[in-house]
Image (cartoon, rainbow, N blue to C red):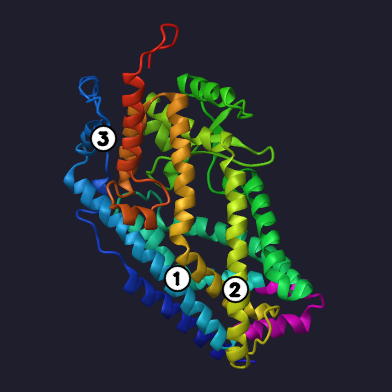
Amino acid sequence: MPTRLSLLRQLVLLWLCGLMAVAVGAAPAAPAATASSAFYLKPADAAWVAALPLDAQAATQAFMDRIPPEVKARSDAYFEGGYWLRLWNWVLGMAIAALLLWTRPSTAWRDWAQARLQRPWLVNACYGAAYSVAGWVLSMPLALYQEFVREHQYGMATQTLGEWLGEQVVALGVGTVMMALLVAVLYAVLRRTGPRWWLWGSVVITALLVVLVAVSPVFIEPLFNTYKPVEAGPVKSQVLAMAQANGVPADNIYEFDASRQTTRVSANVSGLLGTAAIRLNDNLLRRATLPEIRAVMAHEIGHYTLNHVPKMLLQLGLIVTLGFALCHWAMSRLLARYGAAWRVTQVSDIASLPLLTAVFSTYVLLATPALNTLIRTAEIEADYFGLNTAREPVGMSEVLLKLVEYRKADPGPLEEMIFFDHPSARTRIHQAMRWREQMLASPVPAASAPM
């Protein structure tokens, strides 16, 4: 067992690897990327909307032409930097896993827990908790750059360093409890099911995901934001009317104070098994018009009505099953070759967790285009649902321009397929304008309300 001094040196070495990942992985700064350059697009006036061409292609281009060149350059730089950050997060994860496997801290902690704890599940939970804390500490340099420094560079973060760190500590507490539970259950399955662990493990992971989606709006998300009912008025009445007309079991809508963390606009209809709730952030309430809010919330209601959450959980279950099958194949071969050097000889050994994480994260990285395509498909379905419910194609297009703050507006087709988990602004605005073109071109029955 290593001395405290040697263990400290190894932890310092891991920390330095994190610092190196930050230095290498830092995205280039965007033009004029300061807090004062926050993007607020001038709203379209009635005359501009009246003059908007009926042709979908021409109308889409009219919206895109309203994005100033400097804003487009800034947005492109921010989003494209995210491509590199995905890679550097993976590289850092591989470095941490390799060092934990090739050095002594991981197996020393396993041996310590096994010597003091009688039950295997307690050993696994203890290791999982320590692994969570170690991962948080070792990845902190990159997280600090990615989630705090960079967000301030691009004018989207609103927290001080102390506030941000405070939330990170809360997230660490929640994540450590969840990791301990996950690891204890997963490795119990590994011990009991042998070579079929990848199948039963995926069932367990999917079940835990269902529980997480159900409890997160009630117990986890309120740890980071305050939720309160939206004040009575047009927003509340019209959003509730759309929700209830489409089968969402809601008698209220809630706003949360996302402005304490970011300038981004967002909304969701989240929850499962009776915990569903309609929420929108205060940035959306403050920065968007009523037609824009209607468009956004109709889209979110679409996710609920179209059962996207349970469908996505089933799809994720299949993805996890395939990933665990790959892990079983790869880990068996890697442990046969390097297990003696790692002091880990079986997949069911809790000290194999760094290897499992490394193999599975590599699989997820390679599967990024497929995962993004699944999410994009659901987003497109929700867009059409929102258009048919709110009937606000211009409002939808206006709010999509606000999202250009942090999403590249006009990528190439291959770039969009690989890197975008939501359709691009051009794609979505063209959908809205095509809907508008077809609906305005068709005769409207006299009894119908005007659009």
Q: Quadrant of the image for the C terminus?
A: top left
Residue 60 numbered tag:
3
Residue at which label 2 appears: 327
Q: Residue furthest front?
A: 442
- Three-letter amino acid code at the position of disc 1: Trp
Secondary structure mostly seen in the magenta stretch: helix
Q: Residue at x 45, y 78 (%)?
A: 15
Side of 235 where 395 appears, left or right: left
The structure residue drawn at horizontal position 37% and vertical position 77%, both measured from the top left corner, is 20
Front residue of 35 and 420 = 420
Label 1 sits on residue: 90
Where residue 165 appears, as percent x and y from the top left, is 47, 59
**Which mark's residue is nearer the viewer, 3 or 1?**
3
Query: Does residue 80 show up magenta in the picture?
Result: no
Establish if 187 lies above or below 40. Answer: below
Residue type, mark 3 in image: Thr
State the CA–CA distance, disc 3 to disc 2: 45 Å
Residue 263 shows in this picture: yes
- Whichever of callouts 3 and 2 sits on the residue coming sooner in the sequence is 3
The answer to which of marks 3 and 1 sits earlier in the sequence is 3
The residues colored magenta run 106-127
Which SS class for mark 1? helix
Q: Residue at x 42, y 11 (%)?
A: 449
Within-10-Å neighbours for mark 2: few <14, some 14–19, many 20+:
many
Helix, strand or loop at mark 3: helix
Label 1 vs 2, first from the N-terminus: 1
Between tags 1 and 2, which lies in front?
Answer: 2
